[in-house]
Image (spheres, rainbow, N blue to C red):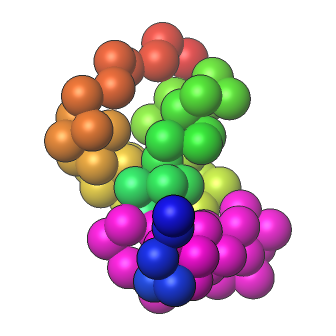
Amino acid sequence: MISQAGHADAEAARRCLRGDLLAEELSTTARELVVTWLHRAGLADREVASQTGMTTYTAARIRARLALPAVQP
């Protein structure tokens, strides 16, 4: 069962992907969801950063922490 906080993080992540929120407004968990979802869609760190308003460094740091391989642009 997903906790109430988990639902809130997922909803915030979806809002970020729609452009309603910037990544800096998200919790750590929600940022991790955004990076994971965009990584699975084949986006490179630079593209993740551009779409979410985070820096390329932040996108790469989160991806590395999640042990996701780098996507070549």
Q: Residue at x 51, y 67 (%)?
A: 2
Q: Is 20 positioned to the left or the right of 21 in the image?
A: right
Q: Residue furthest top?
A: 72
Q: Is 46 positioned to the left or the right of 68 in the image?
A: right
Magenta residues span 6-30
Give the answer, above or below, for where 54 lies relative to 60: below
Give the answer, above or below, for where 59 lies relative to 28: above
The answer to whether residue 53 is seen in the rendering is no
Q: Quadrant of residue 38?
A: top right
Taking depth in this image into account, of 16 and 1 the one nearest to the observer is 1
Look at the image and say whether residue 4 sits in the magenta stretch.
no
Spot occupied by residue 51 in the image (x, y as percentages of width and height): 65, 55
Spot occupied by residue 61 in the image (x, y as percentages of width and height): 22, 46
The answer to whether residue 44 is seen in the rendering is yes
Q: Residue at x 80, y 68 (%)?
A: 18
Q: Residue at x 40, y 55 (%)?
A: 32
Give the answer, above or below, for where 22 lies relative to 17: below
Q: Residue furthest front?
A: 1
Spot occupied by residue 17 in the image (x, y as percentages of width and height): 71, 62
Taking depth in this image into account, of 40 and 8 the one nearest to the observer is 8
Q: How many numbered discs sit on the rendered protein? A: 0
Q: Quadrant of the C terminus?
A: top right
Q: Quadrant of residue 14?
A: bottom right
Taking depth in this image into account, of 6 and 59 the one nearest to the observer is 6
Look at the image and say whether residue 18 sits in the magenta stretch.
yes
Give the answer, above or below, for where 34 lies relative to 8: above
Q: Main secondary structure of the magenta part?
A: helix
